[in-house]
């Protein structure tokens, strides 16, 4: 049988008649005589069966009348005559797209027929715009772009949307779709470049620009973009919340204070805004206003006890105060409630369980801490952060083989995770296999030579394994490769100190402080190193006080300051700081040892014995057990007199 596309052309008079019927059909439709228009198109098709334009126009009319089946059949007839007919492809594409959307709405979660309709829609619409010397319909391109977005074909959507946004500046949906396409394609830099040009003409895009800056961790630029967005829409509370969040992400104290003020204004208008209440608690905590931070967290819990965020903010505030029993008292009932809730999807537990574990660890109750980390790991077995917590909990509980096995198993799924490599190496060292741990980290340095943390971890393990010279060499080599990296410079100072190269260590720490005057850890280490040697104690106190100005509640820094005063024989000042440190860090053996020395010197021998006993029962790090035993015996002798 001969197909229509190969039929002979009709006589001239029939073509003329077909044209007249075609024009009549258009006229009749314009005058709302739809049945007459359809009949005229049918007569035109009979007179000229070789014309694809006639059935294509009839298909469009059927589509406008919501007669999808007739429209598709007639469009198919046109495409059999001319496979490149733009109008027939347009009609078929739009109908298939609508059918797909209709099925997805009725069958959420995916549908095979809808997927097939999407494929057909894309094929037809792409053919409709892919004809040379033909100006394609913007609506067709917009529909096709949406389909590309829906199927994850972002790189195909981007050029379509880019042209449309330029050609149709009044299209409100366009910029958002283009931003979505850039985000889906992972082309954040391209999105930012486009948005930076576009915001001058369309200030409403500042909010989107802020989102992309956030994704790229460009906090200062995000603050500026959200600031412009808020200025353009001062009544938009959501924008204000995002602005406050961006301010907090810069970590600058002035920005956090500004965020606090913005959040207070929001809550004055919307006192039940949970997101703002949570952020306010975090801002107050970072500003050191722990009473207000706690009040804000408890207000959030009171407003919505079914949300985990109030408990999370409260836990962080109590941790800042080192009130670990308070963390347990607050979180344990909440965790039990979330466990019992049928509406819980496990997210709430995953957020709170690690904090319960941390609290028990800080109280030295490692056996109680471990089950919480195990439960969190069961909820999120693929989360490397949670896996890391569980490994560290096993290390703290002295279950070194279990820690190594966990790290090894996790690395099978994520072999490039340097944190897990370092934890496995640490576990192997503590399990009596330092050479295996060192071999792991040496391999990590070779495989990740551009990662400063790999060098620091290897140096630490060399130092722990009494291979100090190698530790120094690794860090000196890394210093040349990463001249501005503070972690390498800091670790070099620590390793040099352990090697008793005190002058070199001092220079290393002074270099860190010169480049970063607010590096509290370096200030404390240098001050403590001087105090430990009884050297330049006034200077030692100065460094440690600067560290405490930055972190007033840091127990390690309080211990350092108390120890410096102890060495200077300023016992009242020493006691004030050492007691605070000892009360806070009950399982830290060094801190308890220091406090015991102070109490012994003040003649409170029974209290000194209690402190030294806590030192022996504590973490055991960096203490001489025999020396402490000797001090306890001496104190007991004093008590007998």
Image (tube, rainbow, N blue to C red):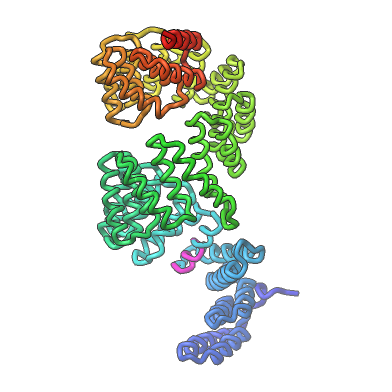
Residue at image location 57% in from the left, 86% down from the top? 41
Residue 492 is at least partly visible in this image: no
Is most of the magenta stretch helix, strand or loop?
Answer: helix
Q: Is residue 185 visible?
A: yes
Quarter of the figure with residue 16: bottom right
Q: Residue at x 44, y 51 (%)?
A: 182
Which residue occupies the foreground of this view, 500 or 154? 500
- Return the residue nearer the eye: 179 or 539: 539
x and y percent of residue 358 in the render?
49, 35
- Quarter of the image for residue 89 reads bottom right
Image vertical order of residue 188 relative to residue 80, above or below: above
Q: Residue drawn at (61%, 61%), measured in percent from left and top? A: 109
Give percent across and percent down for residue 345: 57, 53
Residue 307 drawn in magenta: no
Region of the chain picked out in magenta, as a range: 138-145
Report the front residue among 37 and 513: 513
Above-or-below relation of 47 to 523:
below
**The C terminus: image quadrant:** top left
């Amino acid at each position: 049988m001969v197909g229509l596309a190969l039929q002979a052309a009709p006589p001239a008079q029939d073509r003329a008649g077909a044209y007249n019927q075609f024009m009549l059909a258009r006229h009749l439709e314009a005058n709302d005589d739809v049945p007459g228009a359809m009949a005229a198109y049918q007569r035109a098709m009979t007179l000229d069966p070789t014309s694809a334009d006639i059935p294509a126009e009839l298909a469009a009319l059927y589509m406008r009348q919501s007669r999808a089946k007739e429209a598709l059949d007639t469009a198919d007839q046109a495409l059999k005559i001319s496979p490149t007919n733009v109008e027939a492809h347009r009609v078929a594409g739009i109908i298939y797209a609508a059918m797909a959307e209709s099925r997805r709405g009725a069958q959420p979660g995916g549908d095979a027929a809808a997927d097939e309709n999407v494929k057909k829609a894309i094929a037809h619409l792409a053919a409709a715009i892919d004809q040379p010397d033909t100006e394609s319909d913007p609506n067709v391109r917009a529909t096709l772009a949406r389909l590309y977005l829906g199927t994850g074909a972002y790189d195909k959507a981007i050029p379509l949307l880019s042209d449309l946004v330029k050609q149709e500046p009044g299209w409100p949906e366009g910029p958002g779709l283009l931003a979505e396409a850039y985000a889906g394609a992972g082309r954040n830099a391209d999105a930012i470049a486009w948005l930076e040009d576009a915001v001058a003409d369309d200030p409403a895009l500042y909010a989107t620009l802020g989102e992309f800056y956030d994704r790229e961790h460009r906090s200062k630029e995000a603050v500026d973009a959200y600031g412009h967005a808020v200025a353009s829409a001062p009544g938009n509370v959501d924008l204000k919340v995002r602005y406050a969040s961006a301010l907090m992400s810069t970590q600058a104290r002035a920005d956090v204070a500004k965020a606090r003020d913005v959040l207070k204004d929001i809550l004055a208008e919307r006192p039940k805004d949970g997101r703002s209440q949570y952020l306010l608690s975090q801002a107050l905590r970072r500003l050191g206003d722990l009473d207000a931070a706690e009040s804000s967290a408890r207000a959030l819990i009171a407003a919505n006890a079914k949300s985990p965020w109030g408990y999370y903010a409260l836990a962080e505030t109590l941790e800042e105060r080192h009130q670990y029993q308070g963390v347990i008292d607050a979180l344990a009932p909440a965790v039990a409630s979330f466990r019992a809730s049928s509406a819980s999807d496990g997210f709430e537990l995953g957020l709170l369980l690690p904090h319960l574990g941390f609290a028990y660890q800080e109280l030295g109750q490692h056996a109680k801490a471990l089950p919480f980390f195990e439960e969190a790991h069961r909820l999120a077995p693929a989360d490397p952060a949670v896996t890391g917590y569980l490994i560290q909990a096993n290390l703290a509980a002295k279950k070194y083989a279990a820690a190594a096995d966990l790290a090894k198993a996790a690395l099978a799924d994520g072999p490039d995770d340097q944190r897990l490599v370092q934890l496995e190496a640490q576990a192997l060292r503590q399990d009596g296999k330092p050479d295996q741990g060192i071999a792991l980290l040496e391999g990590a340095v070779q495989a990740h030579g551009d990662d400063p943390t790999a060098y620091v971890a290897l140096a630490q393990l060399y130092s722990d394994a009494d291979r100090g010279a190698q530790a120094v060499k690794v860090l000196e080599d890394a210093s040349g490769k990463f001249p501005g990296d503070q972690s390498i410079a800091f670790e070099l100072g620590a390793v040099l100190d352990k090697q008793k190269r005190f002058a070199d260590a001092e220079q290393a720490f002074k270099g860190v402080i010169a480049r970063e005057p607010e590096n509290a850890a370096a200030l404390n280490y240098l001050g403590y190193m001087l105090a430990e040697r009884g050297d330049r104690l006034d200077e030692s106190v100065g460094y440690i006080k600067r560290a405490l100005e930055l972190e007033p509640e840091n127990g390690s820094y309080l211990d350092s300051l108390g120890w410096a005063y102890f060495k200077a024989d300023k016992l009242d000042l020493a006691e004030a700081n050492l007691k605070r440190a000892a009360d806070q860090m009950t399982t830290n053996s060094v801190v308890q040892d220091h406090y015991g020395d102070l109490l012994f010197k003040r003649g409170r021998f029974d209290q000194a014995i209690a402190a030294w006993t806590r030192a022996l029962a504590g973490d055991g790090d960096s203490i001489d057990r025999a020396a402490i035993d000797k001090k306890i015996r001496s104190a007991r002798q004093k008590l007998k007199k």
